[in-house]
């Protein structure tokens, strides 16, 4: 299991696993490819590649705007898979296809999981898939030989934590806040209690996302979790430099290097 093992290997090397998110096709497919390369060459351990969807209910304004830019380019699942195939010609960094259930269902669950595997991606995360209804999807994932990453929110019950721990064949993604994605200045004061609660119920590694945007956040979370996930802060760099695209990858690289340094125990 490449994703799971990457998290564990990072911890063995005395650092939290660094996971990043970007949207496929933002600002366009050409630059998406360059951004993926930048992530791989500047310390990111696992890449989440978002598939744009017209109703991204868990995403905050920053990622929603990235989705809108991508959809204007008519980016779809096949385009995202093509990005992965091109990336795999040079790089081995594990990739998670990140999306909403409806496009996967329309594609066909077994078909999309096989296509994800064939592209060279290593797993999938379906934001709006309740674990109680995930058996068919998990079977398709297992059959394809990839991993399914589940989300747990601060409102998750003990029963849901137990179900996810049993079903999961990967790390578990902890949502740090009740709400949508987006960079925040400070961490949820109850986050440590939530992480501890989940860790008491599962032996799976846990990685924390939503709202993490600064090295100071990472320095706190690396002591509590197995990995950190950053998305909106990277997307914001893209958004702020749309009129000067060549500088995007340079600014992302500088940001990633600062975050990577802060993941060391």
Image: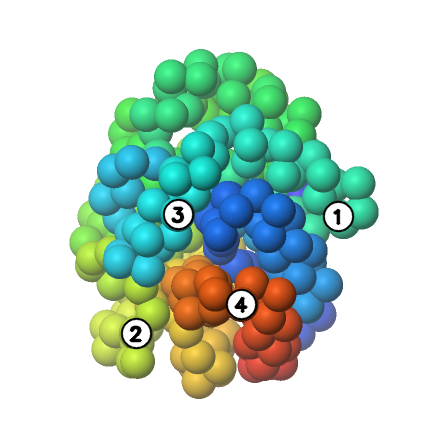
Residue at image mark 4: 244
Q: Dot 1, crowdedness within 10 Å: few (<14), some or many (≥20)?
A: few
Considering only order in the chain, which callout, 2 or 1, is on the residue closer to the N terminus? 1
Q: Quadrant of residue 175?
A: bottom left
Considering only order in the chain, which callout, 1 or 4, is on the residue closer to the N terminus? 1
Query: What label does residue 92 carry, if any?
Result: 1
Residue at image mark 2: 184
Please name the residue shown 75% across and 48% down the image.
92
Q: Nearer the viewer, residue 1 or 29?
A: 29
Closest to the camera, between mark 4 and mark 1, is 4
- Examine the rendering and report whether any part of residue 9 can be seen: no
Closest to the camera, between mark 4 and mark 3, is 4
Q: Quadrant of residue 198?
A: bottom left
Residue 119, placed above or below residue 1: above
Please name the residue shown 59% across and 20% down the image.
114
Q: Nearer the viewer, residue 236 or 170?
A: 236
Residue 185 lies, in percent from the top left, at 30, 80
Considering only order in the chain, which callout, 3 or 4, is on the residue closer to the N terminus? 3
Considering only order in the chain, which callout, 2 or 3, is on the residue closer to the N terminus? 3
Give the CA separation, mark 4 to mark 1.
29 Å
Considering only order in the chain, which callout, 3 or 1, is on the residue closer to the N terminus? 3
Give the CA separation, mark 1 to mark 3.
27 Å
Are the two marked residues, 3 and 2, in contact with CB atoms closer than 8 angstroms? no
Query: What label does residue 69 carry, if any?
Result: 3
Closest to the camera, between mark 3 and mark 2, is 3
Give the CA separation, mark 4 to mark 3.
16 Å
For residue 45, side relative to residue 22 (left or right): right
Are the two marked residues, 2 and 4, in contact with CB atoms closer than 8 angstroms? no
């Amino acid at each position: 299991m490449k994703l799971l093992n990457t998290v564990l290997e990072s911890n063995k090397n005395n650092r939290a696993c660094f996971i990043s998110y970007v949207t496929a096709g933002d600002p366009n497919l050409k630059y998406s490819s360059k951004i993926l390369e930048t992530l791989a060459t500047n310390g990111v351990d696992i890449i989440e590649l978002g598939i744009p969807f017209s109703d991204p209910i868990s995403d905050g304004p920053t990622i929603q705007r990235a989705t809108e830019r991508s959809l204007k380019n008519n980016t779809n699942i096949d385009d995202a898979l093509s990005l992965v195939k091109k990336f795999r010609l040079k790089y081995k960094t594990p990739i998670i296809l990140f999306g909403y259930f409806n496009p996967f269902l329309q594609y066909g669950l077994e078909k999309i999981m096989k296509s994800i595997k064939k592209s060279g991606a290593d797993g999938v995360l379906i934001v709006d898939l309740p674990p109680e209804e995930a058996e068919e999807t998990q079977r398709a994932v297992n059959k394809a030989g990839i991993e399914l990453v589940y989300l747990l929110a601060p409102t998750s019950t003990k029963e849901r934590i137990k179900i996810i721990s049993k079903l999961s064949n990967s790390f578990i993604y902890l949502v740090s806040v009740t709400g949508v994605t987006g960079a925040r200045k400070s961490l949820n004061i109850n986050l440590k209690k939530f992480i501890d609660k989940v860790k008491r119920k599962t032996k799976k590694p846990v990685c924390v996302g939503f709202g993490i945007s600064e090295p100071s956040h990472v320095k706190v979370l690396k002591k509590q979790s197995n990995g950190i996930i950053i998305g909106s802060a990277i997307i914001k760099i893209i958004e702020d430099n749309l009129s000067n695209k060549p500088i995007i990858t340079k600014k992302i690289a500088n940001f990633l290097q600062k975050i990577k340094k802060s993941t060391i125990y």
